[in-house]
Image: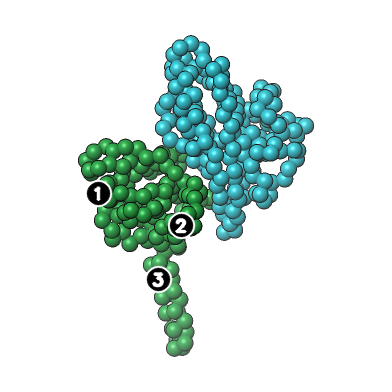
Amino acid sequence: MKLKHSGWRLIRFGLVSILAVVAVGCSSIKYYPNTLHKNVLVKVKKLDSGSMLNEASAHFHVYDIDKQCNLVHLGAVKLDQPEVEVGIPVGKPVVIEVAFGIGGNTFSTTSSTIRVETMLTARKGYFYDVSASYDDGIYDVEVFEKKSRKSRGQAIELVPSNACKTK
Amino acid sequence: MNKSIILILSVAILGLGGCSMHHPQNAQEFRTAAVASSMASIESIEVQRPYKKVVKTFKKYTDKCLAKAYEITSCVNGACSTSVQTYTPTLISTRAGTELHLQLDMSNAVNVSTVSEIPEKGMYVLVLDAVPVDKKTTRIELYSGKWGYTTIKKAVKGWATGEVKGCPDLTAT
C-alpha cells in the first residue's frame, strides 16, 4: 500500500514531535546558565534512595529574591557529579536550594522532592561549600562560608525564604 | 493518594485505635493504645550517651527536620493525584525526661475517611520518651505503629545514639 503525500507528512510531523519531546525532556526544569564566577562548590557526598525501584537525583537551584520577598527562579544545575561548581550573584540576596528527587521513574508509582533552602548574600572574595547527601531516607545539607577555597570555613545557619522580611 | 499511605493509616487506626475506632487524642492515649495493640511497636533501648547530649541533639533536629509539609504525587495506572502531608512535632523537655511527639495531618487528602475525631495537629505517628539512667546512659522508649514510618523511626533512634546526622525524608514511609 502506498501512502499519500499527506500521510507521510503526518508521520513526519509525529516523529518530529516525539523527537522534540525527547530532546526537551519530560521535566520542566529551567537550567541555570552558570556563567558567573564560580564561588560555590556543591559536594554530593551520597545519593542513594535505598530502593532499587526508586531513583535518587539532585539539583541545585538559584532564586533571585526581591525587596518584596518574591522569588524568581534563575534556574537549576543538575548534581550528577560528586562536585559541581556554581557561580551565584555576589552582594545581593539570593536563595539557594538543594532539591532531592526520589522516584518518578518507569517502575515507581510515587515521586517526591525534598527541598532544603537558605537565603544567602554571597560576599565578594568568599567561597561557599554546600555539602549534600541523601542516603536511604536520611538527607543532610550544610553550607559553609570560607575565605579561601582550601579552608574548611564556617557553617552557616540555614535561613528559609519564608523568613524574608519585606523592606 | 498513595495506597501505601492509606494502608498505613488503616493499620494505625485499627491497630492503635482498636475496634472502637478511637484515635488517641494525646501522647498518653497513644502510649496506652500501643501497649494494648498487637499492631503497635514499642522499642526500648539504652544509648551510651549522656541525657543532656541526647536532648541537645533532639532540640537541634526536631523542628528543623520534622516540622514539614510535603506534597506527595502518586500515580496509579496513569492517573495521578496530589496530597499534602503536614507533620507537627512537639518536644517537651525537663531534667527528668524528654518527650517527642510527632503528628501527621492529612485532612486535605482524598480517599481518607475520618472514622473518629482526629487531634487538631493530626494523628499521632510516634511518641518517644527519653530519660536519664545514669551520667552516661539514656533510656529511649519509642511507641509507634508496627509498620511504616521506618525512616522517621531510624532517624529519631539515630539522633539518640548520635549515629544519624541528618533529617528523615518524611515522604519515605
Nearest to N terminus: mark 1 or mark 3: 3
Nearest to N terminus: mark 3 or mark 2: 3
Q: As drawn, is B134 to the left or to the right of A126?
A: right
Which is more foreground, mark 1 or mark 3?
1
The residue tagged 1 is A125
Residue drawn at x 46%, y 25% is B56
The residue lying toward the viewer, choosing from B13 and A53, is B13
The kind of residue tagged 2 is Lys
> Cα distance, mark 2 to mark 1?
24 Å
Q: Looking at the rendering, in which quadrant would you find the C terminus of chain B?
A: top right
Label 1: how many residues lie within 10 Å, few (<14), some (14-19) or many (20+)?
few
The kind of residue tagged 1 is Gly
Question: Farthest front residue?
Answer: A167
User: Compared to A96, does B40 lie above or below?
Assistant: above
Q: In the figure, the green chain has which letter? A: A
Which chain is mark 3 on?
A: A
The residue tagged 3 is A19
The residue lying toward the viewer, choosing from A162 and A27, is A162
Looking at the rendered structure, the secondary structure element under dot 1 is: loop
Q: Position of residue A134 (x, y in %)?
A: 41, 41
Q: Are marks 3 and 2 on the same chain?
A: yes
The residue tagged 2 is A67
Chain B on-screen colour:
cyan
Q: As drawn, is A77 to the left or to the right of B79?
A: left
Residue drawn at x 33%, y 41% is A144
User: Compared to A9, does A20 lie above or below?
Assistant: above
